[in-house]
Amino acid sequence: MIAFIIPNMKRALIISLVFLTNWSYGQVGGQNTYQFLDLDFNARSMALGGDFIALKDGDINLAVANPASIKEKMDNDLALNHFIYPAGINYGQLAFGKTFEKAGTFVGHLRYVSYGQFTRTDETGIEQGTFTAGDYSLGAGYGRQLNERFSVGANLNLIFSHLETYTSFGFGVDVASTYYNEEANLTATVMARNIGYQIKGYTSDNNEPLPLEVLAGISYKFHHAPFRLSLLGTDLTTWDLTYTDPSIGPSIDQLTGDTIPPPSASLVQKIAYHTNFGFELVPSDNFFFRVGFNYQRRDALGIVDRKGASGFSFGLGIRTKRFEFNYGLSFYSAAGASNVFGITTNFSSW
């Protein structure tokens, strides 16, 4: 079975990416189920502005986000990332890589979100105990090197969600293709994620679409300086991601009596909503410093006239003989920030 699937992966990937934009829906908040799949599940990606897929350096954490970056060196790698959100919300990711002599390398992963404990009340406000809510995705990814510079990969994810007494089950597939030129220190990736179906909705006869998204990214590391720059394009199937407040209607010019239309986003702003920027300082093989900027997050979530560090993110990475530690800090608004801690080890090193 595997021998049949592997040679046809390239053909299937090309077909799916060519026709994807003809039938996909844009990733717009509130219009899809399983929105937790759009979260960053590792410290490195969050520190670099989010949705980081444009790298192939053997990091198993990034391999979950981009299966085309799966490599043989991930054999026996184990990684855990855990995020701490305000209000007791916690989520994270567990990943493990295994290489089989004939089949190749697979990366299994579990992504989880715990929304904490809630108080149940009736329509009159009388408390009736507590309940919990959570989302989970259990999956496996496979990557294959097509030639010296091109690779492809895919994830299969089984998705489960429970909200009080309501449950839902579905599946999703991610497909990706990566170009990696080691001599030029250049990496580029095109990816489509969350292609799937909600098999069982929260209520009967109500199946909602998954947050399907097409992304593209590129990163470049300078040859004679310890810097890596990255640019990510997100939500490429939906042009205008800006929000227009329906409560703000046209106004009347008091001098001329002309009707003034409500303000709308400029072309530059619409383009900026699709872009994430990342900067990584790599002074040695054992220390990393990261900075990211997400314009959409800053403009949409930042408080007017008090944006502060909204949209910016920072991170550190330290590598020892047996462990690699990562930390990420992301500012969403003046109301607070998100922290994530990650640890990676390889059982073979023990």
Image: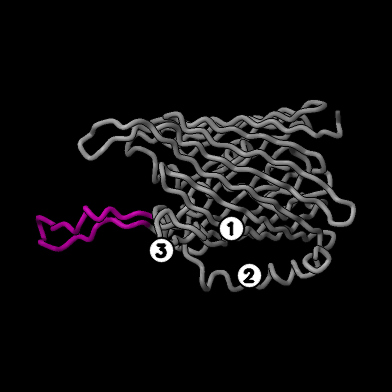
- Between the residue at mark 2 and the residue at mark 1, the CA separation in whole angstroms equals 14 Å
Percent of width and height locating residue 147: 84, 62
- Between the residue at mark 3 and the residue at mark 1, the CA separation in whole angstroms equals 19 Å
- The residue located at (55%, 33%) in the rendering is 83
Mark with earlier residue (2, 1):
2
Rendered view: 29 above or below 42: below
The image quadrant of residue 96 is: top right
Question: What is the magenta range?
Answer: 242-265
- The residue located at (70%, 32%) in the rendering is 288
Q: Quadrant of the C terminus?
A: top right
Query: Amino acid under label 3?
Result: Asp
Task: Find residue 205 and name its label.
Answer: 3
Q: Nearer the viewer, residue 283 or 105?
A: 105
Q: Quadrant of the N terminus?
A: bottom right
Tell me if mark 3 has few (under 14), some (14-19) or many (20+) residues whose alpha carbon lies within 10 angstroms of its own: few
Query: Amino acid under label 2?
Result: Ser
The image quadrant of residue 142 is: bottom right
Question: Label 2 belongs to which residue?
Answer: 16
Task: Find residue 172 and name its label.
Answer: 1
Mark with earlier residue (3, 2):
2
